[in-house]
Amino acid sequence: MLFLWVRLFNLFDWLRNIFFYYLLNPKFALVDTNLLLSYFFKSPYSIARNAYPESGPYGETPFREMDTILKLTYLKASSKVLDIGCGRGRLAFWLQMVKGFDVTGMDINSLFIKRAQKIAHRWNVPATFKEQSCFEIKDFSFDLIYFFILHLSDDELHHFGKRMIRSQTKAYIVTVSFWFGEYLPEQFELVATCNLRFVWGETVGYIQRLKTVK
């Protein structure tokens, strides 16, 4: 039943939003179609579930919802964006090709990353994809960090928040369903919130920064 709902949601999302981006950027249409067809026989949802059953359901951020987020961050073209938990990389390709950002996508699933790297190379897309855990990040020098990982424990989120504090990142940090101020209220300040709609339901997006950032 969930599989059918995902298909219907994606079709509606395509008709309402994605076709518009295809018209604006024909090359992105080709890359996105190539990416989607590469998962035709086995969906990213089943791949993620089989590889990491403890991680919860796989999810992707619809382009329209990311557009809502971006309007609250005032990023310029060529800004550096880190997509943590990028999955198969669809949003990362969109951010790079349609929005013009310098994008790095990161995920622990090797199949997702290798396939995204192959497609990026085939179509000469300068997005970077890394097979890496968020706890292995050494460089936080980005303008926006999109953190879409919903399965970490409170201790793990607290630990990752501490890593960002030590890095003194100046990035806007975007999270879904929680924000780091819940764990480290003295170090994080909330910039804005927005309502977001995913295939699995509605939730809140939180845009935050370190309080030490001037």
Image: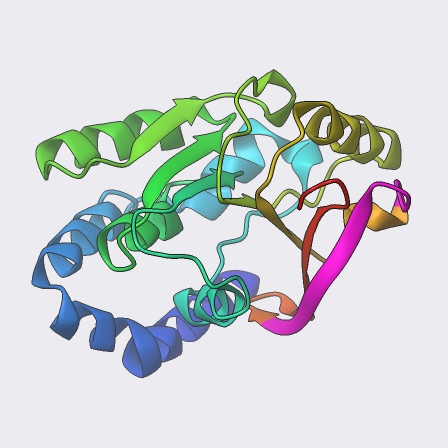
Along the line of sight, the residue nearer the viewer: 116 or 53:
116
Along the line of sight, the residue nearer the viewer: 195 or 62:
195
Q: Main secondary structure of the magenta part?
A: strand
Along the line of sight, the residue nearer the viewer: 90 or 167:
167
Q: Quadrant of residue 75?
A: bottom left
Residue in the picture at 75% in, 40% down: 212
**Which quarter shows the N terminus?**
bottom right
Give how far across and how far down residue 116 sits, in percent. 29, 34
Left or right position of 75 against 27: right
Residue in the picture at 79% in, 35% down: 157
Residue in the picture at 9% in, 56% down: 27
Eyeballing the image, is 116 above or below 60? above
Magenta stretch: give its range. 183-196
Eyeballing the image, is 1 above or below 187? below
Q: Is residue 188 magenta?
A: yes
Give how far across and how far down residue 12 sits, in percent. 38, 79
Left or right position of 71 against 185: left
Along the line of sight, the residue nearer the viewer: 163 or 34:
163
Q: In which quarter of the image is residue 26?
A: bottom left
Residue 178 at least partly seen: no
Give how far across and how far down residue 83 sits, in percent. 48, 41
